[in-house]
Image (cartoon, grey):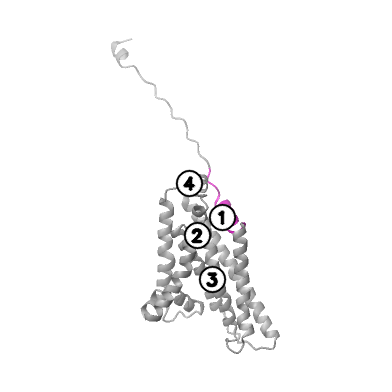
Amino acid sequence: MTSTTMMHPVRTPVAEAPRATFPGIPFGRLVRVEWGKATDTRAAHWLLIAVAASTVGLMLAPILSPSSIEQSYTSYLGFAAVALSILLPVVSILTLTSEWSQHTALATFTQEPRRMRIIRAKITVSLMLGAGAAVFGGLVTAAGIGVAVASGRTLDPNLDAGLLAAFLLYVILNVMTGVALGALVHNSAAAIVASFVLPIGFALLGRASQLVAEWLDYSTAFSWLLNAEWSGHTSQILVSVILWVAIPLAAGLLRTVRREIN
């Protein structure tokens, strides 16, 4: 053995052990899990029952007050839409805030570290609930119209495909306001309070300022949407969607991805 070899022994490279790779959780399974979280708890059951009961209850208004409320298909559908917009966003809020309010974020994000996939599953569940609620609202409306017609009343059949699409979009956008608040606030109580206080506050401010009423109060813009009044109001509707859905949702997603779990 030469001196060079003795001074500098040859090192045999050690092969690195292959890293274990695990397949990601299928997105369909994530959706099923989040669906269970959103619907299978006692609180969720009572909240969904309250959504259904309020929709049926508010439908009694045009049936019992034919002289003071417009008797048309669109009017009846509007009552169903308003009823769904009251409590349905709360369901979406709880869907997005449950991990933080119930302190299950560590377990959830450990099983699926890619947080955006969890959030996408929660948003998918919220949209599914919104679509199902819209169908339920349509059925309640049809039943209300049937009761009114059976009582000998004549209703104006002024409902078309455009108004039905507007009704569905109205329900979905109200659901997405809840999703955006839940994603941003991460606290169930605070987000629920904000979902009721902010619209009321901007509605009151809108009485003093036309600018606030038309551009910042999303209840006004969404009412135009529900009635398919796009002409002259398209810009206001889009601004409301950006301010109340797109911006807070984007900020909420960023916060969810970066937030540390204690």
For marks 1 and 3 on the same chain, the one whose residue lies earlier in the sequence: 1
The residue identified by callout 3 is 86
Marked residue nearer the N-terminal end (1 or 2): 1
Q: Which mark is residue 84?
A: none
| Residue 202 x, y percent position in the rendering | 41, 74
**Amino acid type, mark 3:** Ile
Label 1 with label 4: CB-CB less than 8 Å: no
Q: Which x, y percent locates residue 220?
A: 45, 77
Q: Tags 1 and 2 in contact by the CB under 8 Å rule?
A: no
Q: Which mark is residue 113?
A: 4
Residue 234 drawn above or below residue 48: below
Image coordinates for residue 18, horizontal then vertical, percent = 47, 33
**Marks 4 and 3, how far apart at CA:** 34 Å
Query: What amino acid is labelled 1 in the image?
Result: Glu
Separation of marks 1 and 4 at Cα, in angstroms: 15 Å
Q: Tell me which numbered mark, 3 or 2, is placed earlier along the sequence.
A: 3
Q: Give the residue at mark 2.
A: 188
Between 84 and 190, the one lying in front of the other is: 190
Q: Nearer the viewer, residue 167 or 107?
A: 107
